Image (tube, rainbow, N blue to C red):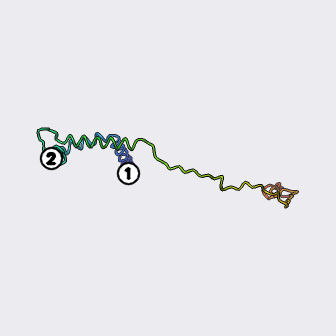
Amino acid sequence: MRYLFAITVLFGLLLQNFSQLVIMVKYKIDQAYIASVLCENRDKPDMHCNGKCYLRKQLKQDEQQQQNGSTGKEKYEVTYIDALLEFNFAPIAPSTDLFVYYQDPAIHTPLFSFFHPPQA
């Protein structure tokens, strides 16, 4: 099942790369229908167009589609935010509360206590 999926994905990627070849093959297969129904010059048989105008139009459309899709440049909207207006840089008065720790409570947690082996 994985091989079938891999082959399908590979085939899809190759079709994308060889899109002009696919258009040419499709034209050759449906040439009678294109010449009789889709051709712009079907009313002028002396031109011997046989649907080549339709083929040229399809190839030009594919080329424009590839040029538009392969630039790799996406447009992003950038907005400028002036964040300095949000902060208040007023001087802060010193606090009158004074906290003095003679012993750091983090050192006396059970994680930092010394291991004493059990005495028998």
Answer with left or right where residue 91 lies relative to residue 57: right
Residue 7 in percent (x, y) is at 36, 45
Front of the two marks 2 and 1: 2
Circle 2 packing at 10 Å, graded few (<14), some (14-19), many (20+), is: some
Q: Amino acid at mark 1?
A: Met
Q: Secondary structure at mark 2?
A: helix
State the residue position of label 2: 36
Q: Amino acid at mark 2?
A: Ser
Q: Secondary structure at mark 1?
A: loop
Which residue is outermost to the right? 102
N-terminal of the pair, mark 2 or mark 1, is 1
Q: Which image quadrant for residue 69?
A: top left
Q: 118 or 57: which is nearer to us? A: 57
State the residue position of label 1: 1
Residue 91 in percent (x, y) is at 77, 55
Which residue is outermost to the top? 47
